[in-house]
Image (tube, rainbow, N blue to C red):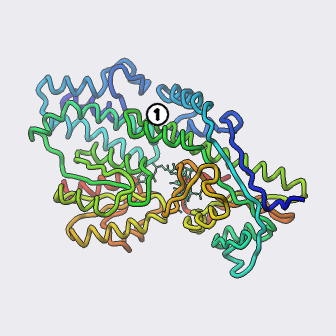
Amino acid sequence: MNELLTKLAECVEFGKINKAAPFPPQMKGQDGADEITRQALDSGVPAQDILGEGLMPGMERVGIKFRENKVFVPQVLMSAKAMSTAMVHLKPYFASGEAKQKGTFIIGTVQGDLHDIGKNLVAMMVEGNGYKVVDLGTDCPAEKYLAAIRENPGAVIGLSALLTTTMTSMEKITREIKNAFPETLVAVGGAPVNDDFRLKIGADVYAPDPQGVVEFLNTKIA
Amino acid sequence: MMNIADVIFEQTYRFDELTIDLDQLSRDLGYEFDDLPEPFAGYLEQVVDDCRHLTDICGTYRLMDCVHSGDGARTVMAGNVEFKVGKTIANELLRAEKLAVFVCTAGKTISEKSAVFLKGDDPVLGYVYDIMGSAITEAVGDEIQQVISREVSLLGEKITNRYSPGYCHWNVADQHKLFSLFPAAPCGVTLTASALMHPVKSISGVIGIGKNVVFRHYQCDLCNMPNCVYRGK
Ligand code: B12
């Protein structure tokens, strides 16, 4: 495999944004995701390969390490930043259709709830694994999800809730989505949510961590 | 003589008056304090410096008579307000003669700052503000707990640990009843219909008081939340 892509995967895995970034200490002074993506494009590596063979493998390793408690939220944020810095260079190729994402994931924190770090981590990880992510923000009523599905047919939905009181809102939203779009897949998560609750409200998958929903998407969409 | 149960204590705190465990914060960032790499070390220093300017860190409590009636195994009464605290917490409060109901907050400033950076282009800095906000909130809880402990010890009374709606089978919606015991927006904290406190970095709860209550560390084997803030405390 192209050596630049191997290096790029490492930049994402360890959160090396660009040459100037001091983090991580062991990569100080080396090129980061920013420079390497540019170099790869300049040397003719297709944007699709940069995404699929450089960025995605790096992000997948982060997701697994996060699930195994080997890295924490800040390291994931660093990796996500490295990823998004690289994506800036790739944007024109997605716009022209030369490179493609695997599918679309729409995520939001349910109505009545304002927590967003957990939801953001899921969004970053899903995006880093090659999906287009539509982030609806927090305190989202059912109509907002429904409108987003209309705009993005075939998208999978993610609902996040951090309080037991707002889990009722998660139930209501899931039912409304399933009524309007029976084929649409709904993933649920957040600290008080579990698989029994997922089953009760008729959602399709519960995952305790972002990697879980990535794996679900990879089996259902990719 | 003034009836003690009618007094609402409210106190703002400066950051430096609180005990913040920087070692724990470092661990939340993924490192031991002495090995904290850049940019985390610099961020933590920056956030600590900034927190010294906070003026809206606040804790408040009110002492209420505690009545055990009705379904005593699962509920307690603060005055005439019934809290459905569930078996575990009811058991801890069984011998309480009074209850201190409390609300503590790290304030609007840090909650907003964290949100701005998290949504903006420096989520890592936002996250450092976020976990600092949580640490400040709990540190105010510790202070309030000590104030109450000192106060009641003058009367030969002791306190229990603190318990919050949303933990150990106590429904988070009971916060509406808890807030009804305070004037509107205690310490500037308000409650949404879905029982979410604003600012986000806030906690609410009760502490049992009495000659025969026992301070016990949290009984974590009853709960399955692996990374709970109260684990082992
Ligand atoms: C830190 C913390 C606090 C802090 C900060 C709160 C804040 N919002 O910033 C403080 C101390 C202030 C606090 C206060 C309270 N808290 Co609190 N808190 C926590 C704690 C320990 C961590 C939350 C956190 O930041 N996690 C980190 C983020 C990254 O994780 P996350 O949001 O869960 O997201 C991850 C997963 O859930 C998942 N995920 C999230 N969304 C989605 C979506 C999909 C589709 C998928 C697949 C996955 C997924 O992926 C994310 C990344 O791994 C949790 C317990 C826990 N260990 O989770 C309790 C917890 C959230 N708190 C709880 C409670 C009850 C409260 C209070 C109501 C207590 C009180 N009465 O005072 C208050 C409420 C505050 C308010 N504003 O209303 C309960 C909520 C459940 C419930 N009973 O309703 C929890 C779950 C603890 C428990 N043991 O029950 N809390």
Q: Nearer the viewer, residue B93 or B189?
A: B189
Crowding near the residue tagged with mark 1, few <14, some 14–19, many ≥20 C-alpha atoms within 10 Å: many
> Which residue sits furthest bottom?
B70
Closest to the observer, B51 or A212: B51
Residue A115 appears left or right of B228: left
Q: Is residue B203 above or below residue B55?
A: below
Q: Nearer the viewer, residue B87 or A26?
A: B87
Q: Give the residue at mark 1.
A: B125
| Mark 1 vs ligand 1: CB below 8 Å | no
Where residue A118 sits: x, y (%)? 42, 50
**Residue at point 18% right, 29% down?**
A2
Q: From the image, which quarter does the N terminus of chain B lie in? A: bottom right
Residue B88 image point, x, y percent: 67, 69
Q: Could you say which quadrant of the image residue A21 lies in?
A: top left
Question: Viewed as shown, does residue B98 lie left or right of A121?
Answer: right
Give above or below for B59 relative to B211: above
Residue type marked 1: Leu
The answer for which chain carries disc 1 is B
Q: Residue at x 22, y 65 (%)?
A: A184
Count of numbered tags: 1
Residue sitting at x 31%, y 63%:
A142
Q: x%, y% of residue B157?
A: 86, 59
Residue A215 lies left or right of residue B18; in this view the side is left
Residue at the location (37% across, 69% down)? A171
Left or right of B69? Residue B52 is left
Q: Nearer the viewer, residue A105 or B55?
A: B55
Element marked by disc 1: helix
